[in-house]
Image (cartoon, rainbow, N blue to C red):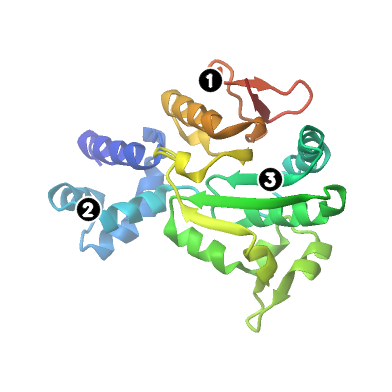
């Protein structure tokens, strides 16, 4: 792939998804886009990009973005954030709103749905500590493919074994004839899955008490990170919290938050 072709595809990916692609990730382009290229009748990526330049097709562009977007996820991924929700975040909300009410949660870049379903299970398990509170979970992604899977709530044995305690499996899932597992209708109904690009205006989602945007910003350049963080701050309740990945930080990028003094990954609006 020549420099012009790489510049074209990397610019397209950044404009559509925020993904900042470096040249050392060229192997990803080749492994993930060659199947799409061949389905379009191109023998290699250079031929495919020539087709994209001459005949832009929105369907193909979405396939390209989808293929290059990392959709890695698992139930109760990293564990610590869910402990923080149980032991820190929910008690803080209860203290701020002793009369109860609706808690709105946004799972951004939700992939195949394991994060929002883990949240739903967490909230149901903690319900006895939160009398008077109800939950609304909004889960978004830019990939219709992963959103379709998330809405179905059907997972393989391999996906189930990654992070899901056996007690919650037996309580909230049913085994299907093909040995896959489907999450209960009750949990599926707790979550509103919808397509949303973090680079677009997401104020239409409303205001939130908890926003999880974990392990997403690491793929963005600094300017894109700043824009997303500032826009999240605008829709975060004054007593709300932003949860990022354990290795992510906003120091020197965005001044709209204060960092938790005791809990890594928790950021509060200022």
Residue ID for mark 1 = 254
**Numbered disc in front, either 2 or 3:** 3
Q: Where is residue 139 in the image (x, y as percent from the top left)?
A: 56, 51
Q: Position of residue 250 (x, y in %)?
A: 58, 23
Mark closest to the chain's N terminus, 2 or 1: 2
Q: Callout 1: 10 Å neighbours few (<14), some, many (20+)? A: some
Q: Verify CB contact (< 8 Å) between mark 2 and mark 1.
A: no
Q: Distance between the residues labelled 1 and 3?
A: 25 Å
**Numbered disc in front, either 1 or 3:** 3
Image height of 176 relative to 12, above or below: below
Picture residue at 61% right of the left edge, 25% below the top:
249
Q: Position of residue 126 (x, y in %)?
A: 82, 51
Q: Name the image quarter holding residue 263.
A: top right
Residue ID for mark 3 = 103
Q: Which secondary structure lies at badge 1?
A: loop
Q: Which secondary structure lies at badge 2?
A: helix
Q: Callout 2: 10 Å neighbours few (<14), some, many (20+)? A: many
Residue ID for mark 2 = 48
Q: How far apart are marks 2 and 1 (CA)?
A: 38 Å
Locate the N terminus by quadrant: top left
Q: Verify CB contact (< 8 Å) between mark 1 and mark 3.
A: no
Picture residue at 77% right of the left edge, 32% below the top:
96
In the picture, measured across the screen, residue 251 lies left or right of residue 148, that is right
Picture residue at 55% right of the left edge, 65% below the top:
151
Mark closest to the chain's N terminus, 2 or 3: 2
In the picture, measured across the screen, residue 173 lies left or right of residue 110, that is right
Picture residue at 34% right of the left edge, 56% below the top:
63
């Amino acid at each position: 792939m020549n420099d012009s072709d790489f510049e074209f595809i990397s610019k397209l990916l950044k404009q559509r998804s925020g993904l900042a692609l470096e040249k050392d990730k060229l192997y990803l382009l080749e492994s993930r886009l060659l199947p799409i290229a061949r389905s379009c009748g191109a023998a290699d990526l250079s031929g495919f990009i020539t087709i994209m330049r001459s005949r832009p097709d929105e369907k193909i562009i979405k396939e390209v973005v989808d293929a290059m977007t990392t959709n890695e996820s698992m139930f109760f991924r990293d564990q610590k954030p869910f402990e923080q929700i149980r032991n820190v975040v929910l008690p803080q909300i209860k203290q701020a709103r002793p009369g109860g009410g609706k808690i709105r949660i946004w799972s951004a870049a939700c992939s195949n749905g394991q994060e929002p379903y883990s949240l739903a299970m967490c909230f149901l398990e903690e319900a006895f500590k939160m009398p008077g509170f109800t939950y609304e979970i909004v889960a978004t992604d830019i990939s219709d493919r992963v959103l379709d899977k998330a809405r179905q709530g059907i997972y393989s044995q391999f996906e189930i074994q990654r992070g899901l305690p056996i007690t919650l499996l037996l309580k909230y899932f049913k085994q299907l004839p093909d040995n896959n597992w489907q999450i209960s209708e009750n949990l599926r109904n707790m979550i509103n899955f919808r397509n949303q690009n973090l680079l677009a205006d997401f104020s239409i989602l409303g205001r939130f008490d908890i926003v999880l945007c974990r392990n997403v910003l690491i793929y963005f350049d600094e300017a894109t990170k700043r824009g997303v963080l500032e826009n999240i701050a605008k829709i975060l309740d004054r007593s709300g919290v932003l949860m990022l990945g354990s290795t992510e930080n906003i120091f020197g990028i965005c001044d709209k938050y204060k960092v938790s003094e005791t809990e890594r990954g928790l950021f509060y609006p200022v």
